[in-house]
Image (cartoon, rainbow, N blue to C red):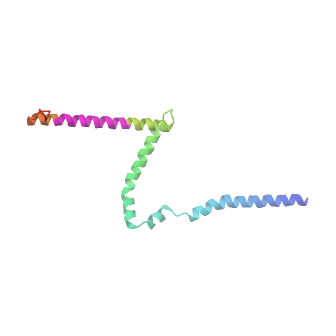
Amino acid sequence: MAARSGRLGTWIKMLAAGGAVCVGGPALVMWVSPTDEELFKKYNPELQKKSLERRYEKQKDFDDFVVRLKEYSKSDKPIWMVQEEADRKKKEEMLRQDFLGAEEAKARKEALRKESGLSPNPSS
């Protein structure tokens, strides 16, 4: 019977120690970790000013990211594949816009040459 009470004591000690670690560990981390406001107050004034100036931009970027992520999640495909496709389409659109801009600039240049009476080939 003595052996059985010894095991019971061991189990009780183990449960108490496990509970202390499972509850006390996160409690200690929460108690020791500084809040966002405390960290912000430790910045030097120049960094505080920059942070406040960029806060709106960062919030807008994050909101845009979340909106795009919601759109990507509506697809049956994995999000990263949909994101790659969207990035590829965006890149193709940018290249197309650049090409159209270059063509337009070339046309303007030709129009200016014709107005000024210069020949298209400078060697002739």
Above or below, 26 against 72 in this view is below
Residue furthest to the right in view is 1
Residue drawn at 91 percent across, 58 percent down: 1
Dominant SS type (magenta):
helix
- Residue sitting farthest toward the left: 117
Decide if residue 60 is on the left or right side of residue 109: right
Residue situated in front as seen by the camera: 120 or 105? 120
Residue 98 among magenta residues = yes
In x, y percent, where is residue 36?
48, 61
Residue under the point 48% across and 65% down: 38
Would you identify the image quadrant in which residue 55 lies?
Answer: bottom left
Up-down relation of residue 27 to residue 82 (above or below): below
Q: Residue at x 20, y 35 (%)?
A: 106
Instruction: Please tell me whether residue 6 belongs to the stretch shown in magenta.
Output: no
- Quadrant location of the C terminus in the rendered image: top left
Magenta-tinted stretch? 90-109
Looking at this view, is 93 or 4 the one in front? 93
Instruction: Give the residue drawn at x 74%, y 61%.
Output: 16
